[in-house]
Amino acid sequence: MTFGFMLIFHLLAAKDTVNIDGMDSLIYSGNYTIKVTQIEPTSASTVQANTIYTLTIRNDSVYSDLPYFGRAYAVNYNQNNGLEMETSITDYSVIKKDKGMKEARFVSRTINDTYKWLLRFENDGTVQIQVSMSNKQPIRFVGTIRSPKL
């Protein structure tokens, strides 16, 4: 009975993951979603995400509902909460790294700031996201890559 539950749990969990070949095609196409599980502010301790946060790259655009914890150097009272944005991206590039890992880099701009994104994709589907901004401290996130929700 325990084996049956473990098998069902594994099958349900595997349904939402991406194999390595599929992951590579998603990364190079620039069409994927990252589900964030961990938030790593620059000047605070790591926070486990208890809400579903995502970063989606689709058709030369970024859709982000990521939170932000950190120090802002300049505050604009018209800005959204966190790193919430739906905007175009520029300079999307993918670089192969050691041991089959990949890095994607791109830039997005909003009225309030410029965001430089660095995404490190590991072979197990884990993704480290680092965001540098002009008006705020950098922040990191950890998550897993998924096929995009259309």
Image (cartoon, rainbow, N blue to C red):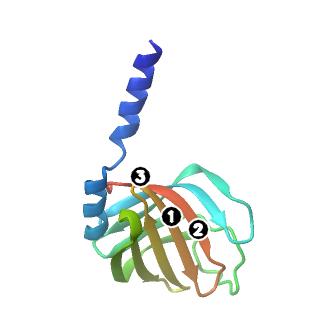
Query: Disc 3 to disc 2, how far (Cα)?
Result: 19 Å
Quadrant for the C terminus in the image:
bottom left
**Percent position (x, y) of residue 8?**
38, 25
| Mark 1–mark 2 CB contact (< 8 Å) | yes
Of the residues shown, which amino acid type is indicated by label 1?
Gln
Farthest residue to the top: give it.
1
Instruction: Count neighbours of disc 2 (C-alpha within 10 A) and say few if under 14, some if 14 to 19, many if 20 or more.
Output: some
Of the residues shown, which amino acid type is indicated by label 3?
Asp
The residue to which callout 1 is attached is 128
Circle on res. 6: none
Task: Residue 150: tell me if it is visible.
Answer: no
Q: Where 21 falls versus 128 (above or below)?
A: above
Image quadrant assignment for residue 22? bottom left
Q: Earlier in the sequence, mark 1 or mark 2?
A: 1
Q: Secondary structure at mark 3?
A: loop
Farthest residue to the right: give it.
44
The residue to which callout 2 is attached is 140
Q: Where 35 falls versus 138 (above or below)?
A: above
The residue to which callout 3 is attached is 124
